[in-house]
Image (cartoon, coloured by chain):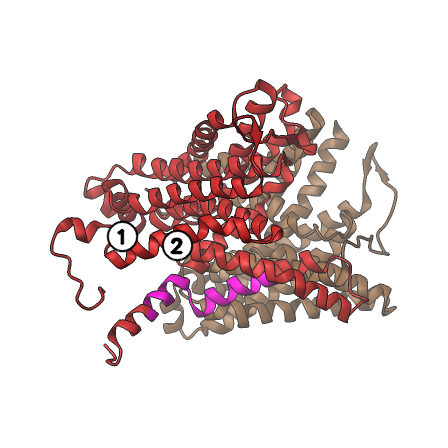
Amino acid sequence: MLPSGTFNTRPEQDMAIVRTKTQWLLLLLGLAFFFTLGLYMPGDWLVWLIILGMYVVAVLGLHIMTGLCGQFSMGQAAFMAVGAYTTAVLCTNYGLSPWLTLPISGIFAGLVGLVFGTPALRIKGFYLVMSTIAAQFIVVWLIRESPGIGLDTGGVYGISVPKITVAGEGLDYVQFWWLVLAVVVVMTYFAKNIQRTSTGRSFVAVRDNDLAAEVMGVNLFRTKLLAFFIGCFFAGIAGWLWAHFYGWITPAQFDFRLSLWFLGMIIIGGMGSTTGAIMGAVTIRLMDKMVDPLADAISSAFPNLSVQVAPALSLIVFALVVIFFILVEPKGLYHRWERIKLYYRLHPFAY
Amino acid sequence: MGDVLVQGLLVGGVYSLIALGFVLVFKASRVLNLAYGEMFAILAYFLYWLLDSMGIPAWLGIPILVVCGALLGWAVERFAIRPLMNQSFLALLMMTLMLGFLLKGIIVLVWGGDSFVLPFTPTGTIDVIGLQIVPAAAWAFVVAILFFLLLTVLFRYTKIGLAMRVVAGDHTVAQSLGIRVRQIFSTSWVISGAFAAICAVLVGMVWMVTPEVGDLALGKGLPVLLVGGLDSIPGALAGGLIVGVVESLGGYWAAPVREIIPWILMLVILLVRPYGLFGQKRIERI
């Protein structure tokens, strides 16, 4: 529902991502805010922001795959690992420039995604989830064991990744944040824009009813595989950022738990909405940031508890938040936000 | 070679035992309980606490554990699964996974990284006609076979088992026949919880009890389940034995391959026969 006094009189207005002048102003102010955020954030929050940015990219990919096309994936972290290891192996062992490996990581992750997406042509729903769980374990295993067949990925111990350089100098945290911000903005625009194209509409048609979609002339084969490719492409880009930010990657970083975090993020944010996916990522990351002080407080209050209070609490808090959303607000934060907007626009009337 | 085969067969028995716990709930309520692994993991820790800190003897500890398992199963159904009746499969799947996270978090919070061996675990190996056999695995195998027979009888001949099958088929039909659907759901979870307690004892005997012991349910139980067929009790047994033997042979051929074999078997089955070797052909085809 549009705010009072705003009317869409032309098709372009109805299609626009940014509709009104106020929205343009807010968008530019917001971008300026996030751009300068790197300059005055304390160090640990800056790292938090950078990691949030990577998660947002990966979650947007999952949103296109799961939220738009209905192909549930519990293997997003594995596809991220493919992207991260592609750039690591190419840069470290073959001396390629990190800028060159950016598209290669994305595309290679997308191709691996296609391989594990092919079961989607025969099975759907629950059974597809099982095959993506298999993908998660098989990919991580392959990366770990590939030194055995001559591809040097460092095995269990991991591999070092060179820093990204601009004009001969490595990026510091603030500059890396700008890089992450640029990637996030481009990817968000891509995710928003795809919903306006015929590809995006065919994704939604396949999600809602794949038989009806096929009857209407949507090519199921092409659409499902494309959804997998795009979703895993996003994961690959996120993996590229991850590899160059940490500088050292191991297979254990991309475990099944991370995949479930991504899925939890889109469930909390609300399925099928780009804004929702971002909201979910921010919420979960904020919760996780709050765990540390809580863990300190608990371990000083109960000193005879085990030493691993922080990882345990992180699991418990995440589980409780997702359970709360599944039980109380299954449509997610974005739905609640829409309700609030509607209430504000209609006030003082009920409808 | 013979040792490898027999060892694979025995370990396969444990895998079937884990998979039977999944089948039990799935057959009655069409819910795949992915929290099952963490359920038996926390029960194993609880047993350790009973035996070690409370000094309760094993013959008393195990029955107490079974009762606690049944209570846990009841609580999970009542407070987490029942509010989600008729929701999408993803909501249920995520719910059970998140319950698993919750239980795992509690394990790590209370017991930390502690790992231990259950005190009544038999040690050494026994020699049967020239084959070296680990007694704990042999016990687990025997118990798995026993429970397979027990569950077959339950679902085929008892009133409650038949009611469970009707409920799984169609809620409305079941209700019009006078079956209390909610009670049946609850019962199946109680039985599955008690079953998790048995699993906890045997899995704790065969492998050590570590915070990661619950991952077995996902890493082995799920492939076994899909190989055999989600709603088939003979399938769970056959799937477990197949996965156990193939895994063992693969590990004999090249050690790193061992842990990935269940997943590859599962992917192949998903592509060729998605309803599993023994499952009912009710999957929606595209």
| Rendered residue at 71%/57% (across/down) | B200
Question: What is the x, y in percent for residue B174?
Answer: 40, 69
Q: Colour of chain B?
A: brown
Q: Which mark is residue A30?
A: 2
Q: Quadrant of the N terminus of chain A?
A: bottom left
Left or right, residue A7 beside residue A41:
left
User: Mark 2: which amino acid?
Assistant: Gly
Picture coordinates of residue B129, whole percent (x, y): 83, 34
| Among numbered discs 2 and 1, the one appearing first in the sequence | 1
Query: Is residue B208 something that shows in the picture?
Result: yes
Q: Which one is in front, B223 or A218?
A: A218
Chain letter of disc 1 in the image: A
Asked whether A337 falls inside the magenta stretch, the response is yes
Residue B267 to residue B176: above or below: above
The CA span between labels 2 and 1 is 13 Å
Q: Main secondary structure of the magenta part?
A: helix
Marking on residue A18: 1
- Residue at 59 percent of width and 71 percent of height: B75
Q: Which residues are magenta?
A: A317-340
Q: Colour of chain A?
A: red
- Asked if A244 appears above or below B232 in the picture, the reply is above
Three-letter amino acid code of the residue under disc 1: Val
Image-based side of A166 in relation to B221, left or right: left
Name the residue at 86% across, 40% down: B125
Determine which quarter of the picture holds residue A271.
Answer: bottom left
Mark 1 nearby-residue class (10 Å; few <14, some 14–19, many ≥20) = some
Magenta-span inclusion, residue A267: no
Question: As displayed, is residue A159 above or below residue B190?
Answer: above
Tell me the subunit letter for badge 2.
Answer: A
Taking the image as shown, residue A308 lies to the left or right of residue B286, namely right
